[in-house]
Amino acid sequence: MSCAFRRHDPERGSVRIRTVSEVLPPPQHPLPKFEIALPQPDISPWLAGNCGIEGVHHFEAPTPGPHAVITALMHGNEFAGAYALNTLLTQAIRPIRGRLSLIFLNIAAFTRFDPQRPTLSRFVEEDMNRLWCPELIRSRHMSIEMQRVRAICPIIETADLLLDMHSMLWPGPPVLLSGLTTKSLMLGNRLSGLLPTQPWVVQDAGHENGPRLIDHARFASNRTRATACLLEAGQHWQPESQATATQAAALFLLQAGLIAPDALPTMGLAPVTQAIPAVAAPTCPARHATVTHCVQAHTSGFAFVKPFTNGALIRKKGTLLALDGQDEIRTPYNNCLLVMPNLRPLRGHTAVRLAKPG
């Protein structure tokens, strides 16, 4: 797998239209008021780890089974997943079969969090979730994040199932992101079917500037059975995102068979009454979509015509979404799903992903 990562098709078709628009460019939407309703969690009891790697806790059951990995704090200011791991560790949740690894990833960025400037601790030197390329990991490239990736990689390379937990800057409902393999879609489907909100499961090819953890060759290859998905639990620093992340972590372990249903109440969760979907269930839920276009901001003046939220379904093809300099951004088909729109994108950064349901 090359570090020249897979790309979505460019903004082809009728997505970006060069025109002298009669529509006046809307003002850029103001940055949200960053309400820190969810304070920085105390993870100090867990920083030493229990297996010789900082922030990593590993547990093994006497009965054979899969190796499940749950990661949090890929970005240092995304707390929801850290709260979930905190709950699993505080309640001494242990696998009844197989192996379980719980990983606090970017501890260096997390320790720099400042509630007065909460967006600045996403990473220290570079985005950790663009570094999971085997060639890059083996190279001489150095940064704080790269060193941490190298330390964690031996665990990732033995994982059978992985859930990577994140949250979003802009308000919106949760979403599960999977790679383009059928196995990753199936994992997302099973988890979505168990979560009370039943979030969209969105398949995409990742980012142009480097592979995410869920795009690591172990999970992206059809030659292995290992699979992964990414949860965006909701908006940063909100209690609802914490609750979603904790639910997802517990249900991920439940559907993998690593914990029993009676473990859920110890985590403050209601017992699961419905049948757990079969691991090999091939069906796709109604709320599944595939990204077809990744729209980047070509100018610093990129502005949406209204403050769209994650999961907005635009019914009509050709609907105007945004203006970017002289370009109009329009939906390329009916029933176009907007995935994680960034209402204030920097030039060259992703503004929104467009996905086709079904």
Image (cartoon, rainbow, N blue to C red):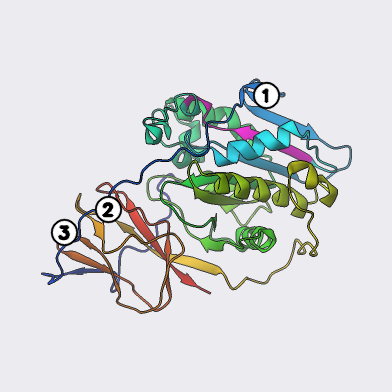
Q: Residues within 10 Å of mark 1 (few under 14, many from 20)?
A: some
Image spot of residue 337 (x, y percent): 44, 68
Front residue of this view, candidates 60 and 191 = 191
Query: Which badge, 3 or 1, comes first in the chain's sequence?
Result: 1
Query: Which badge, 2 or 1, comes first in the chain's sequence?
Result: 2
Q: Residues within 10 Å of mark 3 (few under 14, many from 20)?
A: some
Under mark 1, the amino acid is Gly
Evaluate if marks 3 and 1 touch, with contact meaning CB atoms under 8 Å apart: no
Badge 2 element: loop
Visible residue check, residue 25 = yes
Please tell me which residue is depicted at 39% across the width and 79% down the height of the picture.
334
Image spot of residue 96 (x, y percent): 85, 42
Q: Is residue 290 magenta?
A: no
Residue sitting farthest toward the right: 62
Under mark 2, the amino acid is His
Select label 2 or label 1 by which is in front.
2
Find disc 2 in the rendering and name its residue: 29
Image spot of residue 186 (x, y percent): 65, 62
Find disc 3 in the rendering and name its residue: 325
Q: Quadrant of residue 242?
A: top right
Gap in angstroms between the C-alphas marked 2 and 3: 16 Å
Select label 2 or label 3 by which is in front.
2
Q: Is residue 11 above or below residue 81?
A: below
Please tell me which residue is depicted at 44% across the width and 53% down the height of the picture.
171
Locate residue 311 relative to residue 229 in the image: left or right.
Answer: left
Under mark 3, the amino acid is Gly
Visible residue check, residue 178 = no
Query: Which badge, 2 or 3, comes first in the chain's sequence?
Result: 2
Image spot of residue 124 (x, y percent): 41, 28
Residues in magenta, as a range = 99-108
Gap in angstroms between the C-alphas marked 2 and 1: 42 Å
Find disc 1 in the rendering and name its residue: 49
